Amino acid sequence: MAPTAGPPLSLRPFPVADRQPRNLAEFIARVNARPGGFRSLTEDKLREQIKAEESPDHDAEQEDVDMSDIADDEDAPASKDPNIARMEVLKNVEMASNTAMLTLDTLSLLLSKQNPTQASVTLSQQLRDMVGIGTLGADRLDEPSVDEAKEKAQEEVAIGWTLMEINKTRNAAEAASSFLEREVDTESRYWEEVMAVKKAGWSMCRVPQERHTLGVRFGFSEAAPEFKSNGLAPMRRSDDGSIELDLGRLGGVSEGLVVTYEKDGKLVGRSVPWRRSPDDPSLESRVLEARNTIFSQELWHELTREARTLAAYDVRLQGSRLTCKIEESSKISIELLPLEACPPPDDALPENGTTEMMLLSLHLLLSYAHRYNELLRTRPIPPHVSRARGQQTYTLLRPIIARMKSILSIRACTEYVGGLVGALQKAGLPSSFTLRTPQLSAVEPGASGPNQQSGAQTLVRNMLQPLEFTVEVVILGGTSFTIRGRTFLFPFTATYYHVLLPPSSPLQAMAAPFADGYSELRTLSEYIHTAVARALATDYLAKLAASSTDVEWALDIVGTTIQDVVGNHSGLHLGVRDVDARPTVVLTSVAAGERSSNASQKAWTWAKDGSGSESRTLQDVADELSGTVTA
């Protein structure tokens, strides 16, 4: 057999080191390895060992040992050649390999008769070509002795085990059947509730972090980032098959906004949020309640942000309550409360409709803000305009404040003009006024293109425009004016009054209004007082001039006093003043030559509702004072 290529096999023995310890550590280790170690080492034993080594008998024994070792070394045969030893090892390895291959071929040929496919995998090709497959067999020579009793016992044991396994299989099948039946019932109930929510219009999807869990999306895609991710609740199946909404992101508590209206320290109105009935455990109602909760939470969040910009309008955040002062004696309070802590509804309060209107307006305005964000996100814009606008502060409470200010302005202006016209009518003048307020009409649905506002959005946008009202006032037959009030939202919320005159009105020359308008009702009333007094004085002066009298009458420089040019007759002073916060027409007579003395003056007043009003008309009193009879 030729040697195989490879590194030579070295049979050289390992070198034997010197038997003496090389250092102190090795010496200590050897001593410790001996029985007893240092503990059994005593001075007496060391002296005996030294004496034994120094004795001549010990030297002879040592020499004999050494000589025997030398003799053994001389008698030892010479060491073998390494190449010969390597060849012997390789020969033994090859013999073992051949024996293993022969054994494998024999067993494979024996198995080829029973299972030729499996045996042919390990059968060598040379043996297959030489003898074929299935040519070697084996059989048992002696059959074991048959014991009928033992065989019968074994059959009974086998039958018993078989019956036990059959019973076990039957019990397992019954348990599996009952388990599957319960699973079918629970799954059917689960999917019935899922389909009910799906048919109700709610969106379904997989939970992002739990792909095997189904969730319902009840939030709003255009909500603030703090609430956008909280609008998805996993629908987990309970043991009985009902769905449990995982509302952990909402705090686990259903909440709602409560609006309270107080006047003179007394509660006059309250709006209570909707809550589902305890007898209604349906999944649709629970999802709706969760939607209302997240909407109320976002609405409260936006209201607190907006309240920081409305401090000038008496909007304050006091703890967990937001208060807005409407008048000196009334205020509105808004707070976010759990539904269990909300007060019960009280239908006896007179201003419940006002609070409900405010709450619905807040909901509509936040929904409009969501729609507006969606419109800005989907509408094409020029490439140089950035879409990243940041989170803007929504206008939610400001429109309500503007609406309340507009209502208060209309009420105050109407009460003032009504009192003035009533006083003029008491004085016998043909005065009247007409209040006109624009009505919001429903927007007709038309063909709108993509990325356009719907009819509902257009209606809300129109509601956010400046609020207007007009009051047409007729003082005399040919003298009239119109008051136009406009309540603005931005840059600050206030009502401005403008006085409009007809082109041919005599007030253009005698009392022209301020072109920029009036920011307060007080300044407007001052102008109206002056304009009415001058109009009355001018009208009565024209009547005096048309009468048959030799007295020459004229107006003073202010235009409210009719006086005799010569100075022989008493003068007439016409004016409008506020007496007990009511517009009152005042006619004052001034004696000739003593116009500066208050003692010589006499006054007649006419008010709408006053016990001291003059029963005669202004015309009769003025005629009596002037001493003439006008036509």
Image: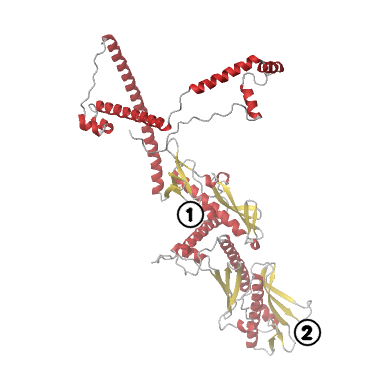
Q: Viewer-proximal residue, 187 or 254? A: 187
**Circle nearer the N terminus (1, 2):** 1
Residue 289 x, y percent position in the rendering = 49, 47
> Helix or strand or loop: what does disc 2 sit on?
loop
Categorize mark 2 by other alpha carbons within 10 Å: few (<14), some (14-19), many (20+): few
Categorize mark 1 by other alpha carbons within 10 Å: few (<14), some (14-19), many (20+): some
Foreground label between 1 and 2: 1
Q: Is residue 556 left or right of residue 138?
A: right
Up-down relation of residue 87 to residue 193 (above or below): above
Query: Disc 2 residue type?
Result: Gly
Residue 275 x, y percent position in the rendering = 51, 46
Up-down relation of residue 545 to residue 313 (above or below): below
Which residue bears the numbered disc 2?
A: 593
Query: Disc 1 residue type?
Result: Phe
Up-down relation of residue 181 to residue 152 (above or below): below
Residue 330 x, y percent position in the rendering = 64, 57
Residue 102 x, y percent position in the rendering = 29, 28
Q: How is the image coloured?
A: secondary structure
Q: Viewer-proximal residue, 448 or 495? A: 448
- Residue at left offset 66%, top offset 55%: 264
Which residue bears the numbered disc 1?
A: 220
